[in-house]
Amino acid sequence: MSEYDHEPIPGLPGTLPAGEEILWRGSPDWFGLAQRAFHVRGFAVYFAVLLVVSLINGTLVGIGLTVGGAVLGLGILFGLAWLSARTTIYTITNKRVVMRFGMALPAAINLPFSAIGGANVAYDGKGRGDIPLILTGKHRLGYLQFWPHARAWKLAHPEPMLRSIKDAAGVVAILSAELARAHASMPTVADSSSAQNSSPNSSPNSSQDRGQPEAPEAIAA
C-alpha cells in the first residue's frame, strides 16, 4: 500500500465535479527531470574536473575518493529524480490544472484556469519540454511549495511548471485551447457589477461576483 492508494482518481485528491473531465494526465520523464531539475550534468562535470586534478596529482586516495563521491552523489540525484517522477502526476481538465507531487509530504496544487494567465514551453531537443504556468492575481503559494516543479529563479512570483513532459507540443496545444476558451467565457468586472445590481441575492463579498479570479490552492493529498 502506498500513500496514494486513497485517491479516487490517480493524481486527484477527490472525484471530479459534474461537467468536469480529464483532458490529459501524465508524469515527468525521470531522466529529463534528473538533467533539468537536479542538474546531474553540472555535477558530473564538477566530479570530472576533480578526477582530472586527482590524476594530475597522482594520488590513489584522491582518485578513489573522487570516484566514490561521484558514484554516490550522482546516484542520489538520479534516485531523487526517479522517485520524484514516480510520485508526480500532472492533470489537465476542462476547468483546471492539478499538480500532485511530494516524495515525503504528498500535496496537490489546484490551479483553476481563471488563475492562470498563460503558459510557455521550453524544449530540450529530445521531444521533452518544460511548461511553466504564469499565475495571475494574489496567492500565498511560495516557490518552495512547487519545487522542483517550478521555473528556476522565479522566487518573488513563482511559476509552477510541468517538467520534462513527453510530447510537450501536444500538451501545450491542449492547455492553450482550454485557457483561451476559459478566458473568453470569463465575465468582466463591468459585467459582474451589472449582474450584482440586477440580482438582489448577489453577495458583495463573493470573488466571482466581483469578477475576481479563483485563487490557486494547496490541498493536502
Image (tube, grey):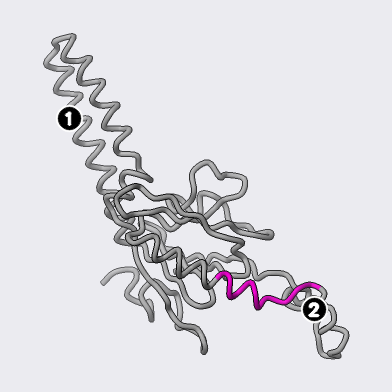
Residue 116, by quadrant, is bottom right
Q: Indicate whether 159 appears above or below 196.
A: above
Residue 48, by quadrant, is top left
Q: Position of residue 20 (x, y in %)?
A: 50, 83
Nearer to us in this view, 12 or 118: 118
Q: Is the magenta region chiefly helix, strand or loop?
A: helix
User: Which residue appears farthest toward the left when viewing the image?
Assistant: 60
Residues in magenta? 179-189
In reply to whether residue 182 is colored magenta, the answer given is yes
Q: Position of residue 49 (x, y in %)?
A: 26, 21
Given contact means CB atoms under 8 Å apart, are the residues at marks 1 and 2 in contact?
Answer: no
Instruction: Please state if 199 lies on the left or on the right of 81 as rendered.
Output: right
Q: Indicate whether 95 appears above or below 34.
A: below
Look at the numbered disc 1 and give the secondary structure of its residue. helix
Instruction: Please state if 153 lies on the left or on the right of 65 as rendered.
Output: right
Kind of residue at badge 2: Asp
Q: Which residue is mark 2?
A: 191
Q: Position of residue 32 (x, y in %)?
A: 31, 50
Look at the numbered disc 2 and give the secondary structure of its residue. helix
Q: Which residue is mark 1?
A: 68
Marks 1 and 2, the one that precedes in the sequence? 1
The C terminus is located in which quarter? Answer: bottom left
Kind of residue at badge 1: Gly
